[in-house]
Image (spheres, rainbow, N blue to C red):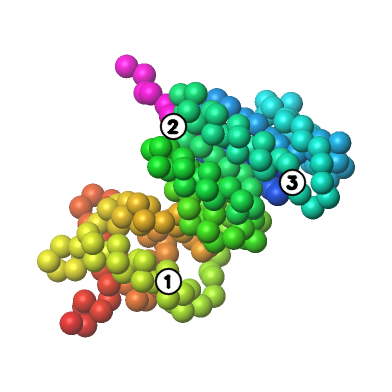
Amino acid sequence: MSEIKQKIALFIDADNAPASKFDVVLSEVAKYGVVTIRKAYGNWKSPTLKSWEELLHEYAIQPVQQYDLIKGKNASDIALVIDAMDIMYTKDIDVMCFITSDCDFTPMVTRALAEGKVVLGFGERKTPSPFVNACSKFLFLDQPETVENASTVKPKNIKSDTKLINLLRQAIAATEDEDGWAALGPVGANISNRTSFDCRNYGYKNLSSLFKEVDLFELKRGSGRSFMVRDARKRKA
């Protein structure tokens, strides 16, 4: 019996997303299923969208024209939200993907999550945190090494990121055994259920690499090839 693949709807805010990283987006969403809807929104008469225009035929993206009716106001945002809502309720879609650095879509993401959809977000690091945190998973696109060569990057002062360290410690505490050790798989699942965290946004290829580089945690091999992780404070105790 063939595997049932999730269906994905992909929405591109062409005014607020880098076209040069679209192949990275497609590679990532392919992990979740097959993209059945691809739509890009913007004023296609504007020269600033030339880079996206060149990708429309190559990747079978449907362009949606929106004129700039009022200076400073983006009609594309409204058109995108209307289409997303329509597709969410009328099409058989499991995953909704938004490529944008604009936080105006945060209510849309929240509604999609409430309807049981997985929401993937892609944008630049200027993307406001409310939108980033609302997504099931969000990946930054404006630092090539973060995505493509993450294993070679060593972010500075990661130990001083209190929010991140607390998130990791809480995920371990929620899944640890009586000796304080937790399997990495459940730890990652616990994190994913709470936030849009992606270790590549911190410069690491995977979660085990991140834990290995931070001496606040212990990492060891469990059964098979799986990893176990523990808060180093448990060892001292």
Q: Mark 1 highlights which residue?
A: 163
Q: Which residues are magenta?
A: 1-9
Q: Residue type at mark 1?
A: Lys
Secondary structure of residue under mark 3 = loop
**Mark 2 crowd level (few <14, some 14–19, many ≥20, 10 Å Cα):** some
- Name the element at disc 1: helix
Disc number for residue 94: 2
- Dot in front, 1 or 3: 3
Callout 3 amino acid: Asn
Q: Which residue is mark 3?
A: 74
Name the residue at 62% across, 58% down: 127
Which residue of the protein is positioned furthest toward the left in this rendering?
Answer: 178
Q: Position of residue 54 (x, y in %)?
A: 79, 34
Magenta span contains residue 85: no
Residue 25 visible in the picture? no
- Label 1 vs label 3: CA separation? 34 Å
Verify CB contact (< 8 Å) between mark 1 and mark 3: no
Mark 3 Cα shell of 10 Å, populated few (<14), some (14-19), many (≥20): some
On the image, the x and y values in percent for residue 142 come to 66, 56
Query: Mark 2 or mark 1: which comes first in sequence?
Result: 2
Q: As drawn, which residue projects farthest toward the bottom?
A: 236
